[in-house]
């Protein structure tokens, strides 16, 4: 197919079912989950009434590696915790559909002889417990999420079994309570060269079918920090890498055995780089041998062109102020001048703030060091661009509210920048 024909086909598909950034799709799914599981009158409903109010299982179709599984897991669990469900009372099951026998999803059939009142017998079929839930005591959880992953790479036999689970909330003889169970589906598109095929129309017609594309801003801000992706990698993706992401814009998933950039592949590359250069990749540029090793690791996962561009981008470290210098003299130390370096500076400062969970496990000395860093960040940030100032403080506050707001300099900082902070909070809530 020619480039022009491919472009025309893509445009036609967009008109039929427009793609949406993954972050926007996630917000929609969270609202569906809240409607289904957190309705004010949920306790007064029977299972049948709750099932009648369901909106259909949401289904995400998107390119491989765009973050579907990671983002769904993080966002749904976070939304439930925010509504008062203890984390240890939430179960998230990821069921990779093609890896499981279709009958194991429903549960193996078990014929049993049943006596009738007149003394005769009939043979009825029951189902042993589904392999999806047999490993867990579902009664130990207040909320259960089940993700049926890679649905579009499954067989028609899988689809027949899945229709009962997705549409009727049943796994064999087990009836799932829609007030405490939420099912989601995900898979790749046929055009993604991932072995996908079309879903049966009756499934598509009864699900909330969303074509998603990578959401760089959402991933960099809300997901990557929680899974340990270094600041310099997040900054590269945000500033430059998005133009190479497969499935975004005019970047198709390549054919043959060609490494390509996705949010998943850069995360895996980051994990491997951290083995050699530390979690913050501080020594990556120390010498030519380190650069060569980094290039080899990156090229094998995201391709040579992206690997080369990332290593050149990593030199931005030389234009930002090290955290110890900020702590030593926040009022007079150098500040980055160009917007790209200021953006990188903000990312490194956010990384320097521990999460509230990590903070709770620190020693007294480590806590004192974290508090000193936060105290120094207030005057330093006020010397940077206002958009970096407000967004950085807001992100830090989400990451560790107590650490930020309990500092001596916080109140005066908020007073001086109240209007700007209010704007950031309002725009975040609206999105």
Image: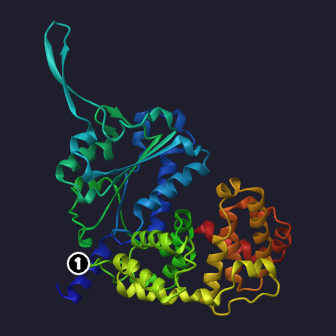
From the viewer's perspective, tell me whether residue 346 is left or right of residue 188: right
Whether residue 55 sits left or right of residue 7 in the image: it is right
Q: Is residue 15 left or right of residue 322?
A: left
Question: Is 85 rendered above or below residue 187?
Answer: above
- Residue at image x 67%, y 70%? 352
- Quadrant where the image shows the C terminus: bottom right
The residue identified by callout 1 is: 255
Q: Name the residue: 76% across, 75% down.
A: 377
The residue that appears at 38% across and 37% down in the rendered structure is 135
Q: SS at mark 1?
A: loop
Q: Which of 292 and 226 is in front in this view?
A: 292
Q: Residues within 10 Å of mark 1 (few under 14, many from 20)?
A: few
Q: Quadrant of the N terminus?
A: bottom left
Residue 425, position as x, y percentages in the image: 68, 69
Rendering quarter of residue 335? bottom right
Picture coordinates of residue 8, whole percent (x, y)? 25, 84
What color scheme is it? rainbow
The residue at the point 86 percent across, 72 percent down is 412
Q: Nearer the viewer, residue 21 or 222?
A: 222
Q: In this view, does 286 lie above or below 115?
A: below
């Amino acid at each position: 197919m020619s480039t022009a024909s491919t472009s025309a086909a893509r445009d036609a598909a967009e008109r039929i079912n427009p793609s949406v950034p993954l972050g926007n799709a996630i917000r929609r799914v969270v609202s569906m989950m809240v409607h289904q599981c957190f309705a004010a009158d949920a306790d007064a409903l029977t299972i049948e009434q709750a099932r009648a109010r369901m909106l259909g299982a949401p289904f995400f179709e998107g390119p491989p590696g765009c973050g579907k599984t990671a983002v769904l897991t993080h966002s749904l669990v976070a939304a439930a915790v925010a509504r008062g469900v203890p984390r240890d009372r939430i179960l998230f099951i990821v069921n990779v559909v093609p890896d499981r026998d279709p009958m194991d999803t429903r549960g193996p059939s078990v014929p049993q002889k049943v006596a009738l009142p007149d003394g005769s017998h009939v043979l009825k079929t029951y189902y042993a417990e589904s392999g999806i839930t047999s490993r867990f005591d579902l009664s130990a959880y207040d909320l259960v999420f089940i993700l049926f992953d890679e649905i579009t790479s499954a067989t028609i036999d899988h689809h027949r079994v899945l229709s009962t689970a997705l549409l009727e909330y049943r796994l064999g003889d087990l009836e799932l309570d829609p007030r405490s169970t939420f099912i989601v589906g995900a898979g790749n598109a046929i055009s993604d060269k991932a072995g996908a095929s079309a879903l049966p129309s009756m499934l598509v017609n009864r699900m909330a079918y969303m074509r998603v594309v990578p959401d760089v801003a959402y991933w960099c801000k809300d997901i990557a920090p929680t899974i340990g992706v270094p600041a310099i990698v997040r900054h590269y993706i945000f500033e430059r890498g998005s133009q190479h992401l497969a499935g975004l814009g005019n970047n198709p998933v390549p054919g043959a055995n060609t490494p390509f950039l996705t949010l998943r592949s850069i995360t895996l590359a980051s994990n491997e780089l951290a083995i050699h250069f530390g979690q913050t990749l501080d020594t990556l540029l120390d010498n030519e041998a380190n650069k060569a090793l980094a290039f080899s690791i990156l090229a094998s996962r995201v391709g040579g062109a992206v690997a080369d561009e990332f290593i050149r981008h990593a030199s931005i470290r030389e234009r930002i102020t090290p955290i110890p210098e900020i702590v030593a003299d926040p009022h007079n130390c150098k500040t980055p001048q160009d917007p790209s370096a200021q953006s990188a500076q903000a990312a490194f400062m956010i990384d320097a703030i521990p999460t509230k969970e990590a903070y709770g496990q620190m020693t007294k000395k480590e806590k004192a060091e974290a508090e000193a860093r936060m105290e120094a960040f207030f005057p330093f940030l006020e010397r940077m661009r206002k958009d970096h100032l407000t967004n950085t403080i807001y992100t830090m506050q989400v990451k560790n509210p107590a650490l930020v707001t309990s500092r001596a300099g916080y109140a005066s900082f908020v007073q001086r920048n109240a209007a700007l902070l209010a704007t950031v909070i309002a725009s975040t809530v609206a999105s």
